[in-house]
Image (tube, helix red, strand yellow):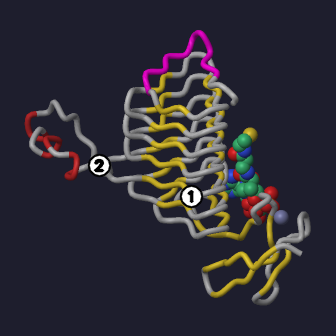
């Protein structure tokens, strides 16, 4: 069985780290965070209690994964992505805001990044957003809406501008069906929705 590797200069308080996972220097995984098997968490990351990271996920350097964020299996988080969990934030210590922060249900909005999706470097993910399976969020995009499965989005605010395969390469539709030139996987499109049909 592969063991967990925790760099001597990392701080890991969570007791739910899956086998084969590696956590590099100057990263802090708080108690109450869950990290799956065979993950790689780069340097200078913070994983807050309540965050969930699925198996085979890569979190590059400089990421803060807050409570309420769920990264499913096989997700790639590029360097310095900005996750958020509160749409109208205030200091909970401000007397006028204290009541709102007395109960997480008032402010905490979850983020879900589904299986196989990629978040490009420096993307901003506003609260309450779901990134669909195998979607690709471009470098520097600002997500204000959900991203459909296999969608490619870019810009600020991010707009849907294409589709990508499970292997990460672009898929171009002429009609309702397309085949990935890189790997031969087949897809079907109906309006703003793409479905995986199978392998060639
Ligand atoms: C978005 C991306 C996948 C390329 O998509 P693409 O549609 O194939 O892009 P192209 O290179 O064909 O460019 C098409 C247009 O999109 C623009 N574009 C490319 N990347 C962009 C981005 N991140 N944000 C905004 N616009 C972008 C190009 O300037 C071009 O615009 P134009 O038509 O006005 O000239 C790629 O640029 C990207 O952001 N990849 C993620 C890289 C990353 O973060 N890696 C992290 C690990 S190191
Ligand atoms: Zn492919």
* Residue 13 part of the magenta segment: yes
Q: Residue at x 77, y 58 (%)?
A: 168
Viewer-side residue, 24 vs 141:
24
Label 2 or label 1, whichever comes before in sequence order? 2
Mark 2 — residue? 108
Disc 2 element: loop
In the image, which residues are magenta?
5-14
Question: Callout 2 environment at 10 Å: few (<14), some (14 to 19), or many (20+)?
Answer: some
Q: Residue at x 51, y 57 (%)?
A: 143
Percent coordinates x, y for residue 51 in the rendering: 43, 40
Q: Main secondary structure of the magenta part?
A: loop
Q: Quadrant of ligand 1?
A: bottom right
Q: Residue 31 sits in which quadrant? A: top left
Mark 1 — residue? 114
Q: Give the mark count.
A: 2
Quarter of the picture containing the N terminus is: top right
Percent coordinates x, y for residue 186 in the rendering: 81, 77
- Image position of 193 (left or right of 68): right
């Amino acid at each position: 069985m592969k063991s967990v590797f925790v760099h001597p200069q990392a701080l890991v308080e969570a007791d739910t780290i899956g086998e084969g996972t590696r956590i590099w220097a100057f990263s802090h995984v708080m108690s109450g965070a869950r990290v799956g098997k065979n993950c790689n968490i780069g340097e200078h990351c913070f994983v807050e209690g309540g965050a969930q990271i699925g198996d085979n996920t890569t979190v590059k350097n400089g990421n803060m994964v807050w409570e309420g964020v769920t990264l499913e299996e096989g997700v790639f988080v590029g360097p310095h992505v900005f996750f958020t969990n509160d749409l109208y934030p205030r200091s909970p210590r401000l007397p006028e805001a204290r009541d709102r922060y007395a109960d997480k249900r008032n402010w905490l909005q979850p983020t879900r990044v589904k299986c196989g999706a990629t978040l490009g470097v420096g993307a901003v993910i506003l609260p309450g957003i779901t990134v669909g399976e195998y979607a690709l969020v471009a470098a520097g995009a600002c997500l204000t809406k959900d991203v459909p499965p296999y969608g490619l989005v870019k810009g600020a605010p991010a707009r849907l501008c294409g589709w990508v395969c499970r292997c990460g390469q672009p898929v171009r539709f002429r009609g309702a069906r397309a085949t990935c030139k890189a790997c031969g996987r087949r897809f079907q499109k109906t309006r703003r929705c793409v479905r995986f049909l199978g392998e060639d």
